[in-house]
Amino acid sequence: MTPSTSSAITLNINGEKHTLPVDHRTTLLDALRERLDLTGTKKGCDQGQCGACTVLIDGRRAVSCLQLAVAAEGREITTIEGVADGDRLHPVQQAFLDLDGYQCGYCTPGQICSALAVIEEHAAGWPSAVTADVRPEAGVPQLTAEEIRERMSGNLCRCGAYVSIVEAVARAAQVSAAEAAQGPSAGTEAAA
Amino acid sequence: MREFGYRRAVDVPGAVALLGADPEARFLGGGTNLVDLMKSGVERPALLVDVRELPLDRIEVTQDGGLRIGATVTNSDLAAHPEVRRRYPALAQAVLAGASGQLRNMATVGGNLLQRTRCGYFTDLAAPCNKRAPGSGCSAVEGEHHNHAILGASAHCVAVHPSDMGVALAAFDAVVSYETADGPGELPLDAFYLPVGDTPHRETALPPGALITAVTLPPAPVAALSRYRKVRERASYAFAIGSIAAALDVRDGVVHEVRLAFGAVASRPWRARTAERALTGGPVSADAFAAAADAELAAAEALPHNGYKVTLTRNLVVAVLTDLAEEAAR
């Protein structure tokens, strides 16, 4: 029996459910942009190499170009459209704005989604490839510029705005840490 | 891309049954390699069996003090796990050295072992490639091969295995567990990857339709002092042009135990047993490290444009063992 090559699926995106029929070949990226008019997520290389299409899936960053839409059913997807709290920008967005963490802006939604996750991953104690000692007894590394560059290396910026991007991620991480110290606030929900 | 069916498996027997013996069906894990290869037309499955929700996402300390890593554990969770970082730090380092944060969140341990080479001719449908189209020839032998194999290759294929994780697993004697319709089985990593010979399209010894369920690391106290070092053409987010996983136990000024495995030199993670034998029981010195590397690399066969890998790998052995010896002396 030949299996069906399409399915009706329900995607949970930014807290809203969307039911749509999809050809199984449809990536999450194409479903977002072409079917659901959520065009904030960008298509760069479409090969998982540039990070422009980064979204959060179940709270973790992922490249939506290599994620089949049908395989994303049942998972919580957060795109750049779901990051702000109404008109109030997320601290990561605000930091990119304040520090000019972009030039043309095409990679920015992916950079911001990735940065949200970098801050969470670091807060969770995850080491990186530049962490000198990965043993848990060594503790959590400081989120230095070197750590940020390594952790953000899956997001390319063709304009070369990296210097400002690193500063924006560092600033946002400081804001997040300060807010965490003061207890939960509305602005950090999307990053949870 | 060819149209395909999609099924989501909820348990291991169900996954194995869904795949059946259909040579046109594939298991889908994180999809970071498979979906990419489907886009380029290298892979043309008629059916995907999604195994990402199988209950194989745990890392457990075994009774004897090793680790059992479920096949659907993501690279991120593997590298972040305290017992991996404590007992096998080189494994955490190797995983962190690979891909990007996004891809590590998606990619699974089972999929990592089964990922395909990044040889450019393998993904270029217009080019002869024995791995993709058996009998068509190898474009790399006389073409672009600066990042191709120096060990264990053949005239039929000189592609390298791209995994960083696998190099550390090779150093630590990992055993791959799998399930088939006829029951479970296991393969030590040494026997998991097949020799290239004249069948480079046959990469592993897994039976047809087998699903990898776990990777088990036997206890290895030597691994507590271990390191992974990767050399690549940019500082981050690139495949290795050379890498090493090493562990060292020095007692009374003598090498009591040593583990060495190389990446980006062969069609498989390359366990350097000749070098290990040369070092064991011997002095802890740069000369001894270099001599052991030379013994291992005596079998190297460089192509016109990848001879640098012999020097690179030798230097990695000396540098990383020297670092570990200094750390051991502290």
Image (spheres, helix red, strand yellow):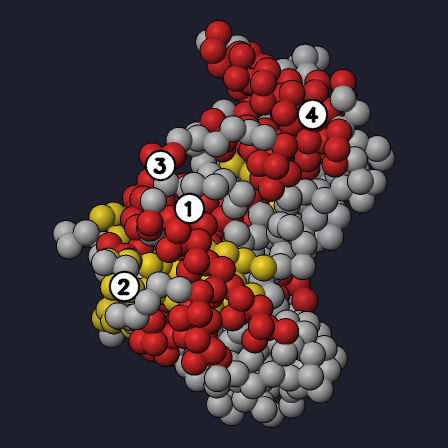
Q: Which residue is mark 2?
A: B254
Residue holding disc 4? A168
Tell me the element at label 2. Answer: strand
Could you tell me how many numbered marks the image carries? 4
Furthest residue in direction top, as rendered: A182
Query: What amino acid is found at the position of numbered circle 1 in the picture?
Result: Ala
Left/right of residue B257 with respect to residue B102 in the rendered view: left
- The answer to whether residue A191 is visible is yes
- Report the residue marked by disc 3: A136
Residue B19, position in %: x, y?
A: 40, 68
Q: Is residue A80 above or below residue B49?
A: above
Q: In this rendering, do the residues under marks 3 and 4 share a single chain?
A: yes
Residue occupying image coordinates x 48% and y 32%: A141
Q: CA distance from mark 1 to mark 2?
A: 31 Å
Q: Which secondary structure lies at badge 1? A: helix
Give the residue at x 37% y 78%.
B274
Q: Position of residue A131 (x, y in %)?
A: 49, 40
